[in-house]
Image: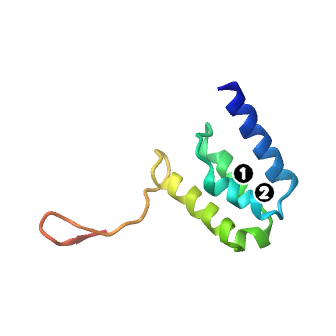
Amino acid sequence: MIEERNYVKNLVAFIKQHPNSNIGGYIIFSAQFDWPQISEYDELYNALGDKVKKGKFGKLAFDKVASLKGTTIVYPAVDFTQADVNGKMFH
């Protein structure tokens, strides 16, 4: 657990030190560990440079953060449309 926390700490430092690196967006998008709070994902995403945010991994990072918020208590739910048991579309 301590090793994972140090690993995460190093990734956070990298993203903040290199805001214009596409690697930062990739790190956020591909992260397979749990950070204690979604606000840390927000902080990391906001640390990305504008060019990275507009790129492929920046957009994927944004989508990941939005998805995590949409499935976490205290954040608005993910917007969806689905048929109910009678086939009527529910939004």
Classify 10 Å Cα crowding around label 1: few (below 14), some (14-19), many (20 and above): few
What percent of the width, then of the height, locates residue 48? 77, 61
Total marks shown come to 2
What residue is shown at x 83% (from left), y 64% (from top)? Answer: 20
Front residue of this view, candidates 54 and 88: 54
- Amino acid type at circle 2 is Ala
Quarter of the image for the C terminus: give it.
Answer: bottom left
Q: Of the numbered discs in the image, which one, if any, rests on residue 43?
A: 1
Q: Of the numbered discs in the image, which one, if any, rests on residue 47?
A: 2
What residue is shown at x 57% (from left), y 63% (from top)? Answer: 63
Classify 10 Å Cα crowding around label 2: few (below 14), some (14-19), many (20 and above): many
Q: Of the numbered discs in the image, which one, if any, rests on residue 60?
A: none
- Amino acid type at circle 1 is Glu
Mark 2 element type: helix
* Image position of 5 with respect to 83: above or below: above
Q: Quadrant of residue 1?
A: top right
Front residue of this view, candidates 62 and 11: 11
Q: Is residue 19 left or right of residue 56?
A: right
Q: Is residue 37 left or right of residue 12?
A: left
| Label 1–label 2 contact, CB within 8 A | yes
Q: Quadrant of residue 77?
A: bottom left
What percent of the width, then of the height, locates residue 2? 70, 25
**Residue most toward the right?**
17
Distance Cα–Cα, label 1 vs label 2 = 6 Å
What residue is shown at x 79% (from left), y 53% (from top)? Answer: 15
Mark 1 element type: helix
**Residue most toward the top?**
2
What residue is shown at x 52% (from left), y 53% (from top)? Answer: 69
Front residue of this view, candidates 5 and 86: 5
